[in-house]
Amino acid sequence: MAQFLGIHDVNDLLVDTTKELAGDPWEAYKTVCAAHNCKPLHVHFNKSVGKAFCVTEANASTDVQAAHDDANLKLQDLIEVELSE
């Protein structure tokens, strides 16, 4: 399976009125991934630049995009990546 790096603006994950995370977006994403034949691997946050980065295994980027859509997670970009050994 290929790996995909999803790039998110942290502000898209916050509740506008409280500036708090809207639930646990990573848990919501993991829940819907199985329905799209995706395997979520991990997520990283960098609050100082306001970005979140998730890594997901899938057969195609369209599967990863569909999982994000079902979890109501907006993607800024989705890039196929390879693990360096």
Image: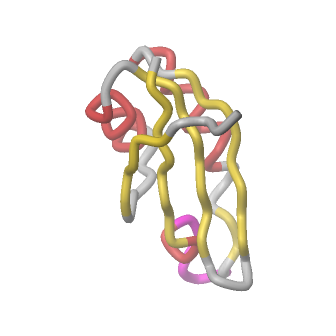
In the rendered image, the residue lying farthest to the left is: 62
Rendered position, 33 above or below 43: above
Residue 25 is inside the magenta segment: no
Residue 23 location (% of width, % of height) = 67, 53
Q: Quadrant of residue 48?
A: bottom right
Residue in the foreground of this view, choosing between 21 and 67: 67
Rendered position, 48 above or below 21: below
Give the position of the C terminus as an image quadrant.
top right
Tell me how many marks there are. 0
Residue in the picture at 65% in, 44% down = 26
Residue in the foreground of this view, choosing between 39 and 68: 39
Residue in the picture at 33% in, 40% down = 65
In the rendered image, the residue lying farthest to the front is: 85
Q: Is residue 14 left or right of residue 69?
A: right
Residue 12 location (% of width, % of height) = 49, 70
Residue in the foreground of this view, choosing between 62 and 34: 62
Residue 27 location (% of width, % of height) = 67, 37
Residue in the picture at 49% in, 60% down = 7
Q: Is residue 30 left or right of residue 1?
A: right
Which contiguous range is marked in magenta?
Answer: 13-18
Rendered position, 58 above or below 77: above
Residue in the foreground of this view, choosing between 63 and 3: 3
Q: Is residue 83 left or right of residue 85?
A: left
Q: How is the image coloured?
A: secondary structure
Rendered position, 67 above or below 46: above
